[in-house]
Amino acid sequence: MTQVYTVRIHDRQNNTYHSIQVPDDRYILMSAENQGLDLPFSCRNGACTACAVRVLSGKIYQPEAMGLSPHLREAGYALLCVSYACSDLEVETQDEDEVYELQFGRYFGKGKVRAGLPLDED
Ligand code: FES
């Protein structure tokens, strides 16, 4: 049976707060759009980090978020375009490029990127 959770979103770009209802079998971004929200996105398939948020409370499931390293997932970041709510949630959008910088910025400049991207760094 489908559970419906309340997801509170702080859109930091516009400094607005929203509360939406999200079934546990629907992507959060899609549910937000269906309820009239205009949130950042680009690829819609978990690859680009444009839709990244920081999870302030609650549990999220994002098995297809290939654009986020395990380290950033553990640090509380999520990609709304491929995320499911597993509880009521509170999230906040990130500044443009913030997650990209966290994930890759320190590598480019230090010569650590040789072949491919460091998504599975320990
Ligand atoms: S829109 Fe690209 S990762 Fe979500």
Image: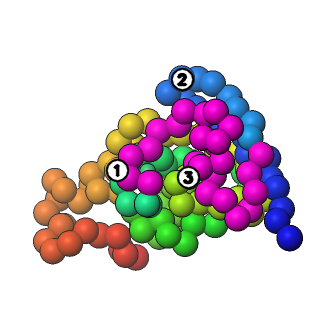
Residue annotated with mark 1: 100
| Callout 1: CB less than 8 Å from ligand 1 | no
Q: Is residue 37 visible?
A: yes
Along the line of sight, the residue nearer the viewer: 98 or 81: 81
Residue annotated with mark 2: 14
Q: Amino acid at mark 1?
A: Tyr
In the figure, is residue 45 to the left or right of 77?
left
Which image quarter is the N terminus in?
bottom right
| Callout 3: CB less than 8 Å from ligand 1 | yes
| Residue 8, position as x, y percentages in the image | 72, 40
Please identify, in this view, whether the residue under mark 3 or under mark 1 is nearer the observer: 3
| Residue 112, position as x, y percentages in the image | 18, 67
Residue annotated with mark 3: 80
Marks 2 & 3, CB-CB < 8 Å contact:
no
What is the spatial separation of the Cα atoms under label 2 and label 1, in whole angstroms? Answer: 20 Å
- Residue 116 lies in what quarter of the image? bottom left
Query: In the picture shown, does residue 60 fall above or below 52?
Result: below
| Residue 13, position as x, y percentages in the image | 50, 27
Would you call the spot at circle 1 few (<14 residues within 10 Å), some (14-19), or many (20 or more)? some
